Image: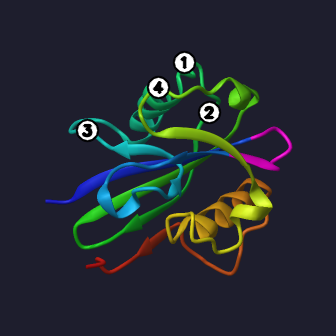
Amino acid sequence: MIMRYCVGFMFSEDWERVLLMRKLKPKWQEGLLNGIGGKVEENESPQFAMIRETIEETGITSPAQWKQFCVIKGPSYELTCFYSQDENLQRARNMEAERLGIYETWRIRIQDEETVSNLPWLISLALDQARGKPGPWKAEVFYCKDME
C-alpha cells in the first residue's frame, strides 16, 4: 500500500521568510525542521489535506491558495509538495506540541543539520517555481528509492 503525504512551505509576501515546524514525529524527523503537512487521508485529495493540515498545525483558517510544485514518489510513498505566499504568516500559532517558527529562506537553502535532509532542496525548488525560474528539470514528478 502506498502511503500518501503532503508538505507545504508558506512564504512571506517578499519570499524572504518561510514558516517551518520543528518536528517531534515521525522519529526520523525528531528535532528537525520541516514544512507544514502530514498524511493524506483515504478519499482525500493532497490539496484538501494541505488545507486541513494548515488549519490543524497553524490555526490559520483561511490560508492562501496552496500551489503544487512537485510530487516525489517512492516504492511505498507519495509526497505532494506545495507552496503559498501568505500575508497570514505572522498569525500562525502553535496548535500542537511541535513548534512553529519563521526562518529566513537564504539560511534554509544551505544544507543544515537542523533540517530534514531534502528541505533545502525543496525550498529552493519551490522558490524557483514560484518566481518562474524553473531549473534544468523537465518533470514535476521525481522518483526516489525508499530509504532504510
From the top left corner, tell me how far across and down residue 65 is, in percent. 62, 33
Question: SS class of the residue under badge 2?
Answer: loop
Q: What residue is at 46 percent from the left and 56 percent from the top?
A: 31
Real-space CA distance between mark 2 and mark 1, rounded to the nearest whole angstrom: 12 Å
Mark 4 or 1 closer to N-term? 1
Q: What residue type is labelled 3?
A: Glu
The quarter holding residue 91 reads top right
Real-space CA distance between mark 3 and mark 4, rounded to the nearest whole angstrom: 20 Å
Mark 3 or 1 closer to N-term? 3
The nearer-to-camera label among 4 and 1 is: 4
In the foreground, 91 or 76: 91
Asked if labels 2 and 3 touch by Cβ distance under 8 angstroms, the answer is no
Q: Does the magenta stretch include residue 17?
A: yes
Q: Look at the image and give the residue range highlighted in magenta.
A: 12-18
Real-space CA distance between mark 4 and mark 1, rounded to the nearest whole angstrom: 12 Å
Q: Does the magenta stretch include residue 77?
A: no
